[in-house]
Image (cartoon, rainbow, N blue to C red):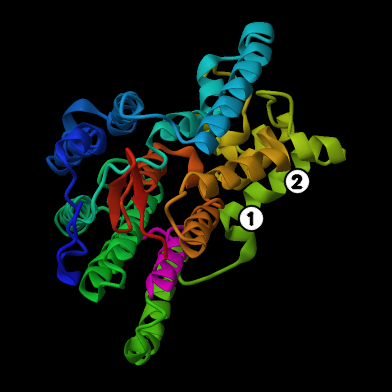
Amino acid sequence: MRLESPAEMTTIVFPKEYDRKDKGGMTLVYLLVAVCLSALCYMQLILGEIFTPLLELVLIVSSISALQRGTINKNALVIAVVSLFYILYSFSVSVLVNGDNLLDFLQAYKSFYYLVLIAPFVGKNFYSREVIEFVFKFSLACFFIKYSLDKFALGEERPILMVENNFELVFLALLFYAYSISIKRLDLPFLFLVCCVFLLSGSRSSIVCLAVVVFFSINAEARVKYLLYLAATPVFFIFIYVVFTSRQGGDFSLEEVDRYKFMLEFLFSTKDWNLMDHMLGATPITPLDPVTCARLTFYGKLFSYDGGDTCYSVILHSFLLRVLYDHGILGLLFLFSSVFFYLPKNSMKERFAVMLVLLSTSLSVSALNNVYVAISLAIMASSMFRNCQPYNEKIECEKL
């Protein structure tokens, strides 16, 4: 590839022998667009809640497609193999030996098989700046239109595009961050639209992740714009206040916060644990204390797929608590360090930002345990954020 002038630095042209490799990830984009359009047309009213399993299928198909486009990154391969062995071991203990329900097992180990599915994307050069921009702007348009219709036309308190907005808003936030990285600045008009979507959603747990994205999207060299950011700060805090008070009815008490209640139940169920238990977590698919399950009967839909009074960590509504209970501190460290190694073309600041976004959503049901985050990570892991060129049959990217 020959760069003729600085103005062409953002244009990446690959010779024909690279076309097949670098366009392989478009399978994910095409399928994602089709799913978003279906959601925008209210297909869930006809077909029911199909979008999450449909996106699971999209990720599987796209991962197989990506697997055929070159070798897997070495670090990603190690992580995928370790995750796969851990899944197989836990499956043998819980399902084959103890006879636990397969669906309960899959619910508890989603994060680890997502790591396996994302691995083929890592380090590839599937998505140019133009593709990232299209995916973000198309997704934002779908969110904005659907949320506006739900809120103002249908009177929904918690608008959704495909599923509960605690899940899907992290997807939008990470896409916005990928877009900000690709254009190397914070796009204020689109930031305003993103904030509108988050405000319409009424989701408290997604506010912090948006704040993290905005903070890390600010170009440190854009000194002239600092006053504008400072002026916008009070507006942002008013935005947060409006969402919180609207969800709490104007009165706030720690005892009324559901996440606080779940944390107390977690502490109750682990009160007899020793240090090793905290490091490794419970035996695969260990139910919570029966007393805890009795206290949380209001969440009956989250009890075991076998029925009855058995409940598992999924009922705690917190990714952080679920991972600590099922996989321990070591499992938590493995998952977040895997995200770091799955973004080899990003700077340390960008990797840290993504990890912080996921950590900020770990108190909710989202983080690494949902397919929406997995898809956004797959896109970021295989995007061309830097100026890249073929060299000695490899794709080398300009470093920061």
Q: Position of residue 347 (x, y in %)?
A: 47, 60
- Mark 2 secondary-structure assignment: helix
| Figure disc tally | 2
> Vertically, is 151 above or below 211?
above
Amino acid type, mark 1: Tyr
Q: Position of residue 243 (x, y in %)?
A: 40, 68
Q: Position of residue 388 (x, y in %)?
A: 30, 53
> Vertically, is 4 above or below 113?
below
Residue hosting label 2:
267
| Numbered tag placed on residue 260 in the rendering | 1
Q: Earlier in the sequence, mark 2 or mark 1?
A: 1
Amino acid type, mark 2: Leu
Residue 223 appearing in the image:
yes
Secondary structure predominantly adopted by residues drawn in magenta: helix
Q: Is residue 354 left or right of residue 46?
A: right
> Do the residues bearing badges 2 and 1 touch, measured as CB atoms within 8 Å?
no
- In the picture, residue 17 is in which quadrant? top left
Callout 1 environment at 10 Å: few (<14), some (14 to 19), or many (20+)? few
Q: Which residues are magenta?
A: 202-218
- In the picture, residue 335 is in which quadrant? top right
- Mark 1 secondary-structure assignment: helix
Of the pair 307 and 51, the residue shown nearer to us: 51
